[in-house]
Image: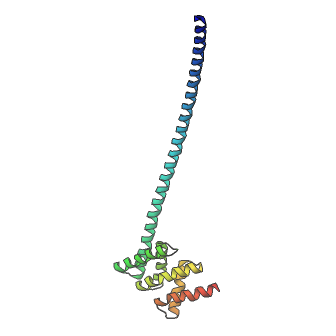
Amino acid sequence: TIGDMVVVMTMNNKSFLKGIEEADRGTMTLTGGVARLSGMLASTLTTAFVGAAAAATYLGTQMIKTGAQFDYEMRQVAAISKSTAKELEMLKDRSRELGSTTMFTAREAASGMVELAKTGMTTREIIQVTGDVLNFAGANMSSLGTAAQFTAATMAQFSLNASEATRIVDVFTAANQN
């Protein structure tokens, strides 16, 4: 009957409206969750980018500082050993080579060169002996300064030339480790 149809349609309409209201509340809950998630993600990304920028700034500063320290050490070697501009370039090249092939950095190799220059070695001798001094320091767990002074003193005491530095390092390292 028509009355039954109106009752069923009214009841179905109420159920339909109730379903829409529940869907609307669900959508609002979802929208709120997405907004919170979006805010957290933005905050996390901002923190990550700030951290990455700080790290990049620090690394850049350290690279500049290391370069300045290397240049300072090389200027000291040149001044003490009275190296020419060409000899200074040879010293720099040797220091960089040792920095890439040993456990020491180029700046540390330059520091060892300064110590060798202080003992009165020529530029040619410094270039030849520095690798042996680095090996001595690494094998005997000594400072570069001590290794340089020890090697230079032994060379002077026994009137040995730079080509014999490897032998000096080998003998003393073997004696130290036995």
Residue 12 screen position, x and y as percent: 59, 15
Viewer-nearest residue: 74 or 95: 95
Dividing the picture into quadrants, the one containing residue 69 is bottom left
> Farthest front residue?
1
Image quarter of residue 71: bottom left
Total tally of numbered discs in the picture: 0
Residue 23, image quadrant: top right
Task: Tell me if residue 98 comes above or below residue 166 in the rendering.
Answer: above
- Identity of the residue furthest to the bottom in this view: 159
Colour scheme used in the picture?
Answer: rainbow
Name the quarter where the N terminus is drawn: top right
**In the displayed structure, would residue 178 be above or below residue 65?**
below
Tell me the residue at 42%/80% (across/down): 80
Residue at point 45% right, 59% down? 60
Point 56% across, 21% down: residue: 20
Q: Position of residue 44 (x, y in %)?
A: 53, 45
Frontmost residue, 67 versus 170: 170
State left or right for residue 141 relative to residue 82.
right
The outermost residue toward the right is 178
Q: Quadrant of the C terminus?
A: bottom right
Q: Provide residue 21's location: percent of width, then percent of height.
A: 57, 21
Q: Nearer the viewer, residue 2 or 99?
A: 2
Quick one: 7 or 64, which is closer to the camera?
7
